[in-house]
Image (tube, rainbow, N blue to C red):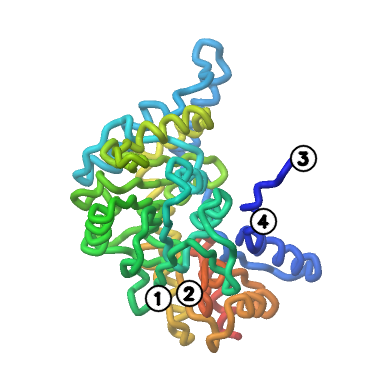
Amino acid sequence: MIRVNENYLKLQAGYLFPEISRRVSAFAGENPKANIIRMGIGDVTEPLVPAVVEAMHKAVDEMGDRATLKGYGPEQGYDFLRQAILDNDYKSRGVDLALDEIFVSDGSKCDTGNIQEVFGLDNTIAVTDPVYPVYVDTNVMAGRTGTPLTNGQYGGIVYMPCTPSNQFVPQFPSEPVDLIYLCYPNNPTGAVATKEQLSRWVDYARKNQAVILFDAAYETYISDPSIPHSIYEVPGARQVAIEFRSFSKTAGFTGLRCAFAVVPKDVVAYAKDGKAVRVNPLWNRRHCTKFNGASYISQAAAAAVYTADGKTQSRRIIDLYMTNAAIIRQSLSKLGYEVYGGINAPYVWITTKNRMGSWEFFDLLLRKIHVVATPGAGFGLAGEGFMRLSAFNRPEKVKEAMERFSTL
Ligand code: MLT
């Protein structure tokens, strides 16, 4: 008899963003005239920049010609893109990596979700609370967690609370952990980690033979020059950290798909007999077996982001989103909300009105002012009483949403 993977039955709610869409669609169905402003999921509103569009047109023409057609590409990505990544994202910041430490993919959601496969099921994972739900759910699916608890958390996971009192950067867990998920600039709180804070985490991982999975999907939004864009800016990180980056939020690729993971050859995990095993060949093996590479067109588009025109044009869009973030911050602080993030990240994290529950506030915003935001509780227990607002929007819509908030 065919059996189900029982781990899937442990998953509690539906995935956060489809659940929000479901509620919004139901409301829109009942209120077809409501002019809904969506500040929930962090999805881009600005079109691909001209340098990217031009590169894609060229790539399409190549694909339409037998002489230049590209079939299956290298699973790890084309060297032209991997070299551009090395030069622009890493060498420029004093980080030396090799081409075969870069693995191009179709998204950081997939990479951060899949990476756990190369680590043993008996590892203890540690996540921040609140957290990007993918890190937790993929470990539940894999069977690395216990049963769900009544508070919505899972047994077997170590949750590290991130609150205003620790500036949303966690303390070390009191019990031993093996796999540590960190995301900075942070989704959902918009907080950043300083070089000192990251150094402490790198030291912790080295001392405890742990691995840090560092999600840097929002690094391009960092404006403070003292904040590291990559964990490899911290000495010793290449022994213990794997980093994830994406073109989704950097260059508006949410609908196009291109990202990459960095797996340095120094990162090791241990076999039962205590032997150190390099993780890079394991990830390479997984990639080659389960993935045929991001499309040539996406990779040509991604390489165009690193051209002089691509950089200038993309920066303009980042600036537009960050102007939105500033408007959200200013307007909501004036209205008396506690406001966090939104300075080095495209997310603003606010307290709910009168400290009501996050989902209750979600409903209030949707029903009263037709604004969609993401309930903090959807990211974890410590997110209760908070709301996340995304700055990915048209400036006029953000201004309109802020006016509507003032009527609440
Ligand atoms: C978010 O809103 O948290 C992100 O857009 C989700 C994602 O990148 O998968």
Task: Please state which amino acid type lies under the numbered disc 1.
Answer: Thr
Assess disc 1: are there few (<14), some (14-19) or many (≥20) residues with their C-alpha within 10 Å of its C-alpha.
Answer: some
Q: Using the image as rendered, state which of residue 353 and residue 150 is in the foreground.
A: 150
Element type where label 3 sits in the image? loop
Task: Please state which amino acid type lies under the numbered disc 4.
Answer: Leu
Q: Determine contact: label 2, label 1, CB under 8 Å.
A: yes
Q: CA distance from mark 2 to mark 4?
A: 24 Å
Per the rendering, the mark at residue 382 is: 2
Query: Looking at the image, which residue is at 33% across and 69% down?
Result: 174
The vertical placement of 116 against 282, above or below, is below
Element type where label 2 sits in the image? helix
Q: Which residue is mark 3?
A: 1
Residue 298: horizontal and vertical position, in percent?
A: 50, 34
Question: Which residue ends up furthest to the right in the rendered image?
Answer: 30
Task: Please state which amino acid type lies under the numbered disc 3.
Answer: Met
Q: CA distance from mark 4 to mark 3?
A: 18 Å
Q: CA distance from mark 3 to mark 1?
A: 47 Å
Assess disc 4: are there few (<14), some (14-19) or many (≥20) residues with their C-alpha within 10 Å of its C-alpha.
Answer: few
Q: Determine contact: label 4, label 3, CB under 8 Å.
A: no
Q: CA distance from mark 4 to mark 1?
A: 30 Å
